[in-house]
Image (tube, grey):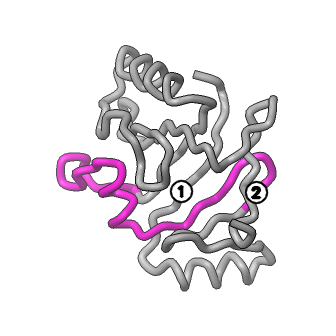
Amino acid sequence: MEQRVSLITLGVADVGRARTFYEGLGWRGQEVSGTVFFQAGGLALVLWGRDELARDGGIDEERAGGFGGVALAQNVRSPEEVDAVVAAAEGAGATVTRPPATTFYGGYAGYFTDPDGHVWEIAHNPGFTLAEDGSLILPDFGAL
């Protein structure tokens, strides 16, 4: 697993309210399918409904002792790399909460939690560009 974070997703109670807050800080958001993406240097900050994020990650809030509402993500270059990283994480002691599979957005992703319950998504998203150094570059969603 490369030592980098591609996205930080915040599970929020009200996506519109959260977007207004971040845009009030001068950030420029792009809304796509109920999520809001902000380019933040070489990574992205994503706002998504807390319940949707927990459901997407296969997180059972009661079993996990309460979901913290934050997921870290690493985007990789292929579906095969998703499989390899999730398998390596499981081998290192992670709990796979959603095995790698095709996603609703046409990509491929899986989720795991580390030994302290922190949620990670490993994803291949063909719509997102990864620079040679692994930096994530969001597309212009308005142009799609």
Binning the other alpha carbons within 10 Å of mark 2 as few (below 14), some (14 to 19) or many (20 upward) gives some
- Mark drawn on residue 25: none
Q: Quadrant of the N terminus?
A: top right
Tell me the kind of residue under disc 2: Ala
**Disc 2 to disc 1, C-alpha distance:** 12 Å
Taking the spot 42% from the left edge, 42% from the top edge, the residue there is 118
**Is 57 covered by the magenta stretch?**
yes
CB under 8 Å between discs 2 and 1:
no
For disc 2, the marked residue is: 40
User: Where does the image place residue 63, in percent across and percent down from the top left?
Assistant: 18, 47
Taking the spot 36% from the left edge, 64% from the top edge, the residue there is 52
Taking the spot 28% from the left edge, 49% from the top edge, the residue there is 59
Tag 1, which secondary structure?
strand
Among numbered discs 2 and 1, the one appearing first in the sequence: 1
User: Where does the image place residue 73, in percent across and percent down from the top left?
Assistant: 54, 43
Tell me the kind of residue under disc 1: Thr
User: Where does the image place residue 40, in percent across and percent down from the top left?
Assistant: 76, 57
Tag 2, which secondary structure?
strand
Outermost residue, left side: 63
For disc 1, the marked residue is: 9
Taking the spot 44% from the left edge, 39% from the top edge, the residue there is 109
Q: Quadrant of the C terminus?
A: bottom right
**Is 119 covered by the magenta stretch?**
no
Binning the other alpha carbons within 10 Å of mark 1 as few (below 14), some (14 to 19) or many (20 upward) gives many
Say whether residue 24 is left or right of residue 11.
Answer: right
User: Where does the image place residue 38, in percent across and percent down from the top left?
Assistant: 70, 64
Q: Which residues are magenta?
A: 39-68
